[in-house]
Structures are given as structure tokens and as C-alpha cells.
């Protein structure tokens, strides 16, 4: 399957490959830039901040509750009372904002009694994901053993976190699934739906937790992201499970855009007032007028959309995709079970991050994790950087900083979570790849999926 050395040089003459490599380089640059920007907020040494803003840098010897002792960098020892240190209203967990632990202290004081069981709990996440995928594959009559699906799940995680480039774990899993069944289109679409079900569960869970804590001002920013994501998730569910909406996709998408725009405008009006967002309201009304004009122009709609829909419906792969989604709509029980597995999977993730925080000595109430972690996962999943590097650390700092967690601790929590789950629990996928006799390269996967061999 591998070409000669001369053939290996050919892709550089391919404009598509050139664009792909440029995009990879851009994502690497963005990732490095974001990580450097975030790490600027890290403190290596401990710091005590007085009420007047004076900082004492060194190593904490005594950390309260009423007395704080620090050995400063000039080899002096100072003792401060709690009343002398800075306090903030956004403290959230009852911790003084004037006590900032450095990176060295955070790692030196890690609690094995919290970290070890939490690390083992993280291993449950890919297992639950494998159970969900196997259930959805069974709806399409694709019988794969749990062991095989679990191997593919770990393999996908390995590609997501260790293989640089645009070939993510989902693409690799789709490639192997397509090779192991005669229902290739169904297998690939099921894999896509598996990811969608997980995202829907994430959005619903976050929305429920935000609704419970709706009066807390710390959740205002998170609630906006959650609401927009939940709207997108609901629209995707309706499209996937309703043939009528798929066949009137233009109206469905336009209606969702109007609903989403109205929700955002109302939210900003309630939080910032009319003078600050008046131009946004006028812009939204202009958009509504444009959409209404387009929808009422029946001749234009028939000329463009109906002809396009008629042409698309004649394509074999489109018909197969439509039939696959239609099959799922006839099995609501399996869909509900898959959604339940997704809830359990996300709750395990949230609980694990909470456990990692406690292992680092970060004392934040659990309900904050129930809202923040789903939003962080959503934002970090946006493919602007490699595996979310830099993006995840920035949003950890932003959200947990709003409840009094120091930047060093929030960023460290992100790094520890990434190391524990994304790195260490992805290593079994590397073992699976090495043991496979039919293992392929990234280039072969991309070529197969581009040419349509995996789903034809």
C-alpha cells in the first residue's frame, strides 16, 4: 500500500495537500502562541499579597488559618495575619485571594489519596464511550464485540492527542470501522452520530446546571455559551431524526438562526441594557427582514433550493445517509440509552476534574464544576489549535478565576487533567496500533477517506 520514495514527494505538488500542511502549521503556531500567552500568568514561587497590593514572593512555611509565614527570596521570614492580606468578593470557595501558591508548591503538595482513585476513574470514560458506540452500531445491524469497539475508541483517542495534523481520531475510527463491515456508510454515519449524541448530552447537562444556578452572576458568561450550544444541539437532533426537516433544511436552519439570534439579543439587552446593544438589535432586525424576504420569495426558493435538493437526492451516498438516520429514528429506546451513557460519561469527567482539583489543594464547590467543565469541553473542542492546547488552559483560567482560583492553580489543573486523561489514558491506543497487523499510516487514512474508499 505504500508508494515508492519518488511517489512520496508527489503530494507536495498537490494544492490540497499544500493547503492542509499550511493549515497544520497555522494550528501549531496558534497552539504555541496560546500556551505561551497563558503560561505568562504562572507563578513559580509562592506569593502573599497585602491589602495595599504589595507582593511578598518566596516560599510559604505556614498557611493559616489565622497566620501566614513566608520565607522571602532575600532570605527573610515574614509573618502576616489574615486581616492583612487581600480579600475579594469573587472568592467563591472561601479562600483568600491574597494567598497565591506557586507552581512548585502546588505539585509538591499533591495529595495521592485524591489523585490515584481519580486517575483510575478517568479510565471509565473511554469504556462508557465504547459502550455507547457499540449500542448505536447495533441499531444498524453492525455486530462488533465490546473489546473490538473499546480498542477502536482508545485508538481514536491516541490519534487525537499524539498525531499532529487534521487526521483526528474519529477519521481513523471511521476508516477501521468501514473496513470491518459491509455496511460502510452506516458505520461511518453512526460514528458521526455517536459524537453528536455526546455533545447533546453535554449541552443538556450544562444547561440544567446553569438553570439551577441561574441567579449566580458567576454563571452569566457560561450560560450564554451553553444556551447557544444547546440550540445548535437541538437543531441537529431534529434534523437527524426528522426527514421532513432534512428535506426542508433551508427553513430549518434559517429558523434556528433567527431563534438563536433573538436569544442572544435578549440576553445582552437584559445584562447590558439598550444603549450598549442598540446597534446589535438593529442589525438583528435587518437580518430578520432579509430572511423573511428570502422565505417569501417562492420563485427564488423553487429556482435554487428545490433544484439543488432534487440533484442532491439522486446521489447514492446522500440516500444512504438519509436511510441511516431514518433507521435511528425508529429506535428511540436505543437513542435514549445512548444519551444516558453520555450523561454518565460526562458526569464521570466532571467528577474526575473535581477530584484532580482536590488533589492539587483547590477547594472549589462541586456545583461550579458541573457548569464550568461542560462549557470548557465545548470551547476546547473548537479546532483552532492542536488538541485544544492553549484554548483549554485559557478557559480553565477564565472560568475558575471567576470563583477565586489563582491563575497558576487553574492552569495547573488544566495541565494535570490533560496529562492524566488525554496523554496517559491515550497510551493504550498506541499499544493497540502497534499490535494491529493491518495498521496504516496517517497518509493512507487521509487518502482512503478523500477518495471515498472507506464508505463506497
Image: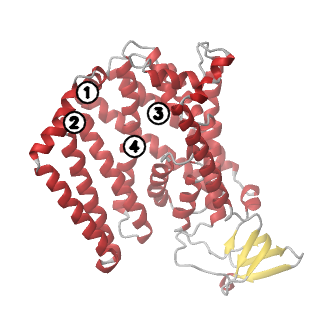
The location of residue 71, given as percent across then percent down, is 84, 74
- The colour style of the image is secondary structure
The image quadrant that residue 225 belongs to is bottom left
Q: Secondary structure at mark 2?
A: helix
Rendered position, 147 above or below 74: above
**Residue that badge 1 annotates:** 322
Side (left or right) of 219 relative to 330: right
Q: Which residue is mark 2?
A: 246
- Is 326 on the left-hand or right-hand side of 425? left
**Which residue is identified by label 3?**
128
Q: CA distance from mark 2 to mark 3?
A: 30 Å
Under tag 4, what secondary structure?
helix
Say whether disc 2 or disc 1 marks the residue closer to the N-terminus.
2
Of label 2 and label 3, which has the lower sequence position?
3
Q: Secondary structure at mark 3?
A: helix
For this rendering, which residue is in front, 352 or 6? 6
Categorize mark 1 by other alpha carbons within 10 Å: few (<14), some (14-19), many (20+): some
Q: Are marks 2 and 1 in contact (CB under 8 Å)?
A: yes
Q: Earlier in the sequence, mark 3 or mark 4?
A: 3
Q: Which residue is mark 4?
A: 199
Query: What residue lies at 24% left-to-right and 51% top-to-bottom?
Result: 256
Q: At 30% across and 51% down in the image, what residue appears?
A: 231
Please tell me the numbered disc located at residue 119.
none
The CA distance from mark 2 to mark 4 is 20 Å
Tell me how far mark 2 sits from mark 1, CA to CA. Answer: 9 Å
- Label 4 crowd bin: few (<14), some (14–19), many (20+), radius 10 Å: many
Is 91 placed left or right of 452 in the picture?
right
SS for dot 1? helix
Work out which residue is located at the far front of the displayed protein and give it. Answer: 13
Q: Position of residue 283 (x, y in %)?
A: 27, 66
Of discs 2 and 3, which sits in the foreground? Answer: 2
Amino acid at each position: 500500500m505504500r508508494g515508492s520514495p519518488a511517489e512520496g514527494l508527489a503530494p507536495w505538488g498537490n494544492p490540497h495537500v499544500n493547503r492542509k500542511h499550511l493549515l497544520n502549521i497555522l494550528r501549531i503556531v496558534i497552539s504555541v502562541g496560546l500556551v505561551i500567552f497563558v503560561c505568562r500568568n504562572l507563578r513559580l514561587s509562592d506569593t502573599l499579597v497585602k491589602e495595599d497590593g504589595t507582593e511578598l514572593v518566596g516560599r510559604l512555611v505556614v498557611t493559616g488559618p489565622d497566620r501566614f509565614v513566608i520565607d522571602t527570596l532575600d532570605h527573610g521570614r515574614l509573618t502576616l495575619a489574615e486581616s492583612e492580606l487581600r480579600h475579594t468578593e469573587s472568592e467563591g470557595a472561601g479562600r483568600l485571594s491574597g494567598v497565591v501558591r506557586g507552581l512548585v508548591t502546588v505539585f509538591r503538595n499533591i495529595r495521592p489519596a485524591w489523585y490515584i482513585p481519580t486517575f483510575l476513574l478517568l479510565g471509565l470514560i473511554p469504556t462508557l464511550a465504547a459502550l455507547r458506540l457499540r449500542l448505536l452500531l447495533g441499531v444498524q445491524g453492525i455486530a462488533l464485540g465490546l473489546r473490538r469497539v473499546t480498542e477502536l475508541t482508545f485508538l481514536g483517542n491516541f490519534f487525537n492527542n499524539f498525531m499532529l495534523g487534521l487526521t483526528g481520531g474519529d477519521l481513523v475510527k471511521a476508516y477501521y470501522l468501514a473496513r470491518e463491515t459491509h455496511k460502510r456508510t452506516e458505520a461511518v454515519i453512526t460514528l458521526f452520530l455517536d459524537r453528536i449524541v455526546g455533545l447533546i448530552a453535554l449541552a443538556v447537562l450544562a444547561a440544567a446546571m446553569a438553570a439551577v444556578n441561574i441567579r449566580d452572576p458567576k454563571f452569566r458568561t457560561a450560560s450564554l455559551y451553553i444556551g447557544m450550544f444547546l440550540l445548535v444541539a437541538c437543531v441537529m437532533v431534529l434534523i437527524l431524526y426528522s426527514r421532513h426537516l432534512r428535506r426542508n433544511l433551508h427553513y430549518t436552519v434559517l429558523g434556528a438562526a433567527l431563534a438563536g439570534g433573538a436569544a442572544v439579543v435578549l440576553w445582552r439587552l437584559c445584562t447590558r441594557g439598550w444603549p450598549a446593544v442598540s446597534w446589535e438589535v438593529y442589525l438583528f432586525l435587518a437580518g430578520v427582514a432579509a430572511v423573511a424576504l428570502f422565505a417569501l420569495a417562492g420563485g427564488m426558493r423553487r429556482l435554487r433550493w428545490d433544484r439543488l435538493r432534487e440533484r442532491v437526492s439522486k446521489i447514492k451516498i446522500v440516500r444512504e445517509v438519509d436511510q441511516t438516520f431514518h433507521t435511528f429514528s425508529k429506535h428511540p429506546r436505543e437513542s435514549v440509552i445512548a444519551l444516558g451513557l453520555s450523561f454518565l460519561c460526562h458526569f464521570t469527567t466532571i467528577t474526575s476534574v473535581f477530584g484532580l482539583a482536590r488533589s492539587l489543594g483547590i477547594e472549589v464547590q462541586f456545583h461550579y464544576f458541573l457548569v464550568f467543565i461542560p462549557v470548557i469541553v465545548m470551547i476546547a473542542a473548537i479546532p483552532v489549535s492542536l488538541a485544544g492546547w492553549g484554548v483549554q488552559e485559557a478557559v480553565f483560567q477564565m472560568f475558575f478565576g471567576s470563583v477565586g482560583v489563582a491563575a497558576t492553580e487553574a492552569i495547573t489543573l488544566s495541565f494535570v487533567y490533560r496529562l492524566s486523561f488525554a496523554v496517559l489514558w491515550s497510551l493504550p491506543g498506541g499499544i493497540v496500533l502497534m499490535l494491529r497487523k493491518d495498521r496504516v499510516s496517517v497518509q493512507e487514512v487521509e487518502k482512503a477517506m478523500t477518495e471515498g474508499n472507506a464508505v463506497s
